[in-house]
Image: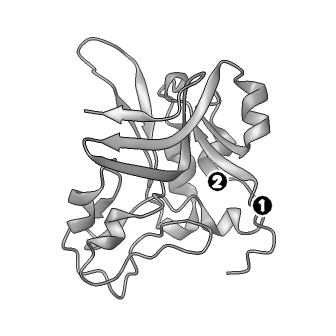
Amino acid sequence: MNWTNFNRNEEFFVDLQRCIGCKACEMACAECETNGQESLISVNYVERSSTIQTTVQVCMHCEDPVCANVCPADAISQDEFGIVHTANTERCIGCSNCVIACPFGVPKKMEEYDLMMKCTMCYDRTSVGKKPMCATVCPSGALFYGTRAEMEEMRPNSSPINTFIFGQETVNTKVNIMMPKGSNELRIY
């Protein structure tokens, strides 16, 4: 892949409170030719019995991806730009270790392909200077791909964080979640 157009200053931002549940991101993702017309992101209800609030789930592209670390077939790779790729079809044995191990619950085992698939941040687009499909169609700004300065201007009362603490484990990611201004991590109990 030729990454000459890849802008290292652009980042992926998710503002969970802005998701309106329209699923435009899912439809755009499914239109991407590199994932077999499957949506590799999902929109979920937070607690459907008591609220209509939805949230979008994308791969967080962990700096030290546990999904790749637990793969016995070495099918999941991370490139020099920090993108964690979908399992290599020739190597994946369909064991689902990655699905179980991901602290964010992102990888999906696609039974019809006997393969793990997940968001690759549209590497086919971002590698040539384009934005990920989902970020180009999100009408509410829940998904944004751009510079940190652009995000700070758009959300002056929020801070992007990419450090998550699960018990005793700290996970740093390439994708940022927008939190109240001054936040620097998210503890998940």
Q: Residue at x 77, y 60 (%)?
A: 7
Q: Nearer the viewer, residue 121 or 25?
A: 121
Side of 9 relative to 187 (left or right)? right
CA gap, disc 2 and disc 1: 13 Å
Side of 140 relative to 97 (left or right)? right
Can residue 5 be spotted in the picture? Answer: yes
Please identify the quadrant where the C terminus is shown: top left
Locate residue 151, reporting x and y percent: 72, 34
Q: Residue at x 26, y 69 (%)?
A: 112
Locate residue 75, reporting x and y percent: 35, 80
Q: Residues within 10 Å of mark 2 (few under 14, many from 20)?
A: many
Can residue 111 be spotted in the picture? Answer: no
Please identify the quadrant where the N terminus is shown: bottom right
Side of 182 relative to 185 (left or right)? right
Q: Residue at x 21, y 67 (%)?
A: 97
Question: Which residue in the protein does label 1 denote?
Answer: 7
Identify which amino acid the numbered label 1 is placed on. Answer: Asn
Answer above or below: position of 86 versus 178: below
Question: Which residue in the protein does label 2 denote?
Answer: 132
In the rendered image, which quarter is residue 92 located in? bottom left
Locate residue 15, reporting x and y percent: 55, 30
Tell me, for residue 32, which label it has, or none.
Answer: none
Side of 179 relative to 129 (left or right)? left
Q: Residues within 10 Å of mark 1 (few under 14, many from 20)?
A: some
Mark whose residue sits in front, 2 or 1: 1
By what rule are the colours in the image chosen?
A: one colour
Closer to the chain start, of discs 2 and 1, is: 1
Extreme residue in the top direction: 50
Locate residue 81, reporting x and y percent: 62, 68
Q: Residue at x 34, y 27 (%)?
A: 45
Mark 2 secondary-structure assignment: loop
Identify which amino acid the numbered label 2 is placed on. Answer: Pro
